[in-house]
Image: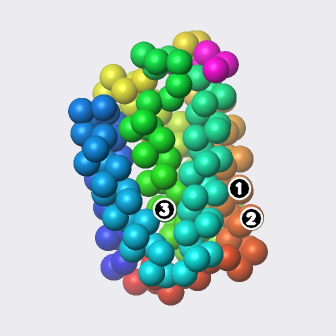
Amino acid sequence: MRLVAISVWFQLLWFLAVLGQSHYQVWLFALVVASYVWLMTLGKHFLSQAVAFSVVGVLVDSLNQAGGLFIFPSHFIPLWLVALWFAFGWYANLMAARLSTLPHLVVIALGAMGGALSYFAGVKFGAVEWGIPFMTTFIILMIEWALLTSLILFASKKEWFSNQYVNN
């Protein structure tokens, strides 16, 4: 049951970020901070891993924008996207132990496809534009998300995670 609740919460944060963008980013930041406050009750290792995943995501998307893959109105990735990455770091951290029990190639393939499709949805909702052709961007995103998913699985093997919070 916790697995479903955590997933639904992340999806709500995703929709708030992508559909609300800068209009609702104050609410988004508040809800992400609340998520991290709850995460801190689970232990410091949970917090540090969530922040680490978030920072990696922000760096990847910053490079994507600098390289012309993404087009945003400003020279930096928007604050709502930074908040979304922190929401994803929170989510990935809580899901890592559960995901590590599944066949890794399946998890990596689903992570690659899901991550790329998430950005495609962002394009359709007007949250981002792609600066290069669709198929090229989609393949690059799939590769990035395969690597990010692999990182999450690798980190879960380091015993930084406990699946007691998502077992139900």
Which residue was labeled with disc 3? Answer: 90
Q: Earlier in the sequence, mark 3 or mark 2?
A: 3
Nearer the observer: mark 1 or 3; the answer is 3
Residue 65 in sight? yes
* x and y percentages locating residue 80 in the rendered image: 39, 38
Q: CA distance from mark 1 to mark 2?
A: 6 Å
**Separation of marks 1 and 3 at Cα, in angstroms:** 17 Å
**Amino acid tagged 1:** Ser
Q: Which mark is residue 52?
A: none
Mark 3 vs mark 2, foreground winner is: 3
In reply to whether residue 155 is colored magenta, the answer given is no
Q: Is residue 68 magenta?
A: yes
Q: Secondary structure at mark 1?
A: helix
Task: Give the farthest residue toward the top.
Answer: 132
Q: What residue is shown at x 61% (from left), y 66% (from top)?
A: 48
Q: Which residues are magenta?
A: 66-70
- Pointer 1 and pointer 2: residues touching (CB < 8 Å)? yes
Residue 160, by quadrant, is bottom right
Main SS class of the magenta portion in the image: loop
Q: Which residue is mark 2?
A: 154
Query: Left of 168 or right of it: where is 150?
Result: right
State the SS at label 3.
helix
The earlier-in-sequence mark between 1 and 3 is: 3
Q: Nearer the viewer, residue 151 or 36?
A: 36
Q: Which residue is mark 1?
A: 150
